[in-house]
Image (spheres, grey):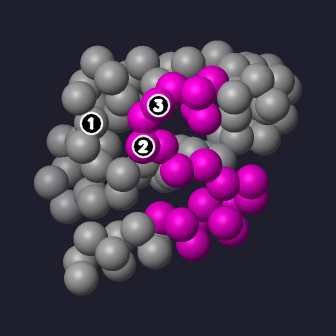
């Protein structure tokens, strides 16, 4: 949650990209935190999420089942491309 608040303090941010490789931490925990932060902070910015590592399938399910407009990606490259494409759509 603190990380989202820090990023949101910068008015120039138009897209948030979350890239997690979970070795010690688990992707399902990270996904729950992203969903919680999105809801509690009332995020309106697009958020792209890339998860890899422990419990990645469960983490993706949590993101997908959240009903939130979170954008998921399988690779860091795909996540970066999605973030750029989303930013370009906003600017158009």
User: Which of the two labelled residues, at mark 1 and mark 2, occupies the earlier sequence position?
Assistant: 1
Q: Residues within 10 Å of mark 3 (few under 14, many from 20)?
A: few
The residue located at (74%, 58%) in the rendering is 75
Residue drawn at (24%, 43%) of the image: 44
Judging from the image, what secondary structure is the residue with disc 3 in?
loop
**Picture coordinates of residue 1, whole percent (x, y):** 38, 22
Q: Which residue is mark 1?
A: 43
- Left or right position of 30 against 48: right
The CA distance from mark 1 to mark 2 is 10 Å
Q: Is residue 66 magenta?
A: yes
Q: Position of residue 92 (x, y in %)?
A: 24, 82
Residue that carries the numbered disc 3 in the rendered image:
67
Residue 2 visible from this viewpoint:
no
Give yes or no for residue 34 being in the magenta stretch.
no
Give percent across and percent down for residue 3.
39, 32
N-terminal of the two: label 1 or label 3?
1
Mark 1, Cα crowd under 10 Å, few <14 / some 14-19 / many 20+, is: few
Which portion, as a residue range, is magenta?
Answer: 62-83
Q: CA distance from mark 2 to mark 3?
A: 7 Å
Residue drawn at (76%, 23%) of the image: 58
**61 relative to 47, above or below:** above
Q: Identify the element where label 1 is drawn.
A: loop
């Amino acid at each position: 949650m603190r990380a989202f608040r820090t990023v949101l303090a910068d008015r120039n941010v138009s897209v948030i990209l979350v890239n997690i490789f979970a070795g010690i931490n688990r992707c399902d925990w990270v996904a729950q935190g992203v969903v919680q932060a999105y809801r509690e902070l009332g995020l309106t910015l697009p958020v792209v999420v890339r998860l890899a590592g422990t419990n990645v399938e469960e983490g993706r399910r949590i993101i997908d089942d959240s009903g939130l407009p979170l954008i998921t990606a399988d690779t860091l490259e795909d996540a970066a491309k999605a973030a750029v494409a989303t930013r370009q759509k906003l600017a158009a």
